[in-house]
Image (spheres, grey):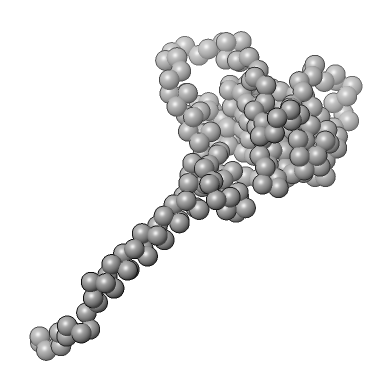
Amino acid sequence: MYNSDSPIRAELPSSKQLFRSTVLAAISAVVLLVAVVLPAEYGVDPTGIGRVLRMTEMGEIKQQLAAEAAADATAAPTGSPASPAAAVPAKASAAVSSTPGAPTVIPKAAVTPAAQSNWRDELTFTLTPGEGKEIKLRMAEGEKAEFQWIVNGGSVNYDTHGDGGGRSISYEKGRSVPTDDGELVAAFTGNHGWYWRNRGQSDVKVVLRTRGQYIDIKQVQ
């Protein structure tokens, strides 16, 4: 039963061949780390390949969500629920832009009831606890779009941002916000919109209304 032939010495790989295979494997691992893992997991894209393959944006969102989770973990201990007034923080500071002097989201007063019937698009969706959703407007540089979104049943964390042509920008962020409205001015041609995440303990319903200068509206995820 043990009649299989053992390989002769000439058939075995030499030390030089083993070393070369090890070096090639190490180089391949480094390339994958730099070109795929860093952009997709950490939003770090030293080669620019991740931005082309749209992996860098995914990594940036993962890092943002990780930061939100860490912030929530260090928040005040859960006891009696905070009052609605205490749960709403001040507006996020001025936008963090990849281009100096780029336009930002311009807050406005609440939309009057008479104007609400003139919205171009209205989307309604439900977020379960921990769930996130991203919706973008396709816009040309300098175009302006008015928006209003309202959370029924709670509040959300959000990030108003844009990407396109290898560029990205974060206009505004907020935590535990029940509603927002304003005017979004595209800093460059591309996709501009919102990412919401429900960090509460129950489902919430989000209503997004938009109008103005944009090609179309789409759900990214």
Residue 193, given in percent of the width and then of the height, sits at 71, 36
194 above or below 48?
Answer: above
Instruction: Examine the image and state in which quarter residue 24 appears.
Output: bottom left
Q: Residue at x 82, y 35 (%)?
A: 142
Q: Residue at x 54, y 46 (%)?
A: 45
Q: Position of residue 10 (x, y in %)?
A: 20, 84
Q: Quadrant of residue 217?
A: top right
Residue that appears at 52% across and 42% down: 44
Q: Is residue 33 left or right of residue 168?
A: left
Left or right: 173, with 68 as reference point? right
Residue 219 seen in this snapshot: no
Residue 89 is left or right of residue 120, and the answer is: left
Q: Closer to the camera, 217 or 14?
A: 14
Residue 108: x and y, percent?
Answer: 79, 19
Q: Quadrant of the N terminus?
A: bottom left
Q: Is residue 30 above or below residue 116?
A: below
Count of numbered badges drawn on the protein: 0
61 up-or-down from 155: above or below: below
Instruction: Point out the residue furthest to the left here.
Output: 2
Answer with left or right where residue 169 lies relative to residue 209. Answer: left
Q: Quadrant of the C terminus?
A: top right
Residue 111 can be seen in this image: yes
User: Against 30, is 110 above or below?
Assistant: above
Provide residue 212's location: percent of width, then percent of height.
Answer: 86, 34
Q: Residue at x 41, y 55 (%)?
A: 30
